[in-house]
Structures are given as C-alpha cells and as structure tokens.
Image (cartoon, rainbow, N blue to C red):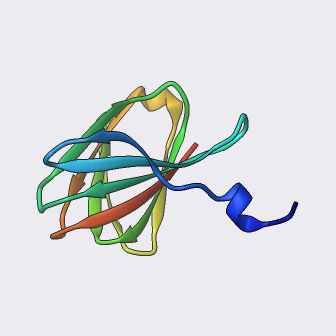
C-alpha cells in the first residue's frame, strides 16, 4: 500500500538530558535522520564520530566546533562535519534550537 502513514513513524527518543533531546526520525540501511533539540541557551551536545554528519539548523542558532575549527550556523543554514574530525560539539546560541542531523 502507498499510504504515507505506513511509512512515516513517530520519533523515537535516543537520548534526553536537561540540555538536549535527540530523537530518531528515520532509519534505513543507507540514510538516517535525527532531530536534535537544544533546550536552552548555552546548552551543548557532544558526539564522537565514525561517519560524517550533516547539521541543518531548522530553527535557532548554534556554534559547531570540530577540532580547532568553530563555525556559527544560523536558522536555514547547514554544515558538514567529516568523519575525520572524530568528534564535534554543538552549542546553542539561542533560547532554543532545532537541528536536523543526517548521516
């Protein structure tokens, strides 16, 4: 059947802290999409990498640091973090930020 309800599922909570919520929106063998919500100003999220991450700021504003490089990413913009960076941190610069993370 081609019913969208059969293919689109509810978000699955992956991690939840006072600083952030991380939910899985989509999982396939070839593509994954998560939503990261940074709950308050200066909230931070850190992640070790084994593959690239693409961060799209749906709303708000964040600062992404990988190694010695830091970039500011505003609403409607995105950045790639290569797997070679080995880790990254996202810091919230707004009251609340929503980020779509694909990999």
In which quadrant of the rendered image does the C terminus lie? top right
Viewer-side residue, 10 vs 41: 10
The residue located at (19%, 47%) in the rendering is 44
Q: Quadrant of residue 77?
A: bottom left
Image side of residue 12 versus residue 47, left or right:
right
Quadrant the N terminus occupies: bottom right
Q: Is residue 101 above or below residue 85?
A: below
Q: Residue at x 42, y 26 (%)?
A: 86
Residue shown at 19% from the left, 59% from the top: 39
Name the residue rendered at 45%, 75% in the picture: 76
- Decide if residue 30 is on the left or right side of residue 38: right
Residue 43: x %, y % from top left: 15, 52
Q: Residue 29 location in percent, x, y?
A: 72, 34
Is 86 positioned to the left or the right of 29 in the image?
Answer: left
Q: Position of residue 93 (x, y in %)?
A: 18, 64
Numbered circles on residues, count? 0
Which residue is more in the foreground, 95 or 83? 95
Extreme residue toward the right, this view: 1
Question: Which residue is at the front of the view, 3 or 11?
Answer: 3
Image-based side of 60 in relation to 11, left or right: left
Expressed as whole percent of the image width and height from the top left, the position of residue 54 reads 52, 50
């Amino acid at each position: 059947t081609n019913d969208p309800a059969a293919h689109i599922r509810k978000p699955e909570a992956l991690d939840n802290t006072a600083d952030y919520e991380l939910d899985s929106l989509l999982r396939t063998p070839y593509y994954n999409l998560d939503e990261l919500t940074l709950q308050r100003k200066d909230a931070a999220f850190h992640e070790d990498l084994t593959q690239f991450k693409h961060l799209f700021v749906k709303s708000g504003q964040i600062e992404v640091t990988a190694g010695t490089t830091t970039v500011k990413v505003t609403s409607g913009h995105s950045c790639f973090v290569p797997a070679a960076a080995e880790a990254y941190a996202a810091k919230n610069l707004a009251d609340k930020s929503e980020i779509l993370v694909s990999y």
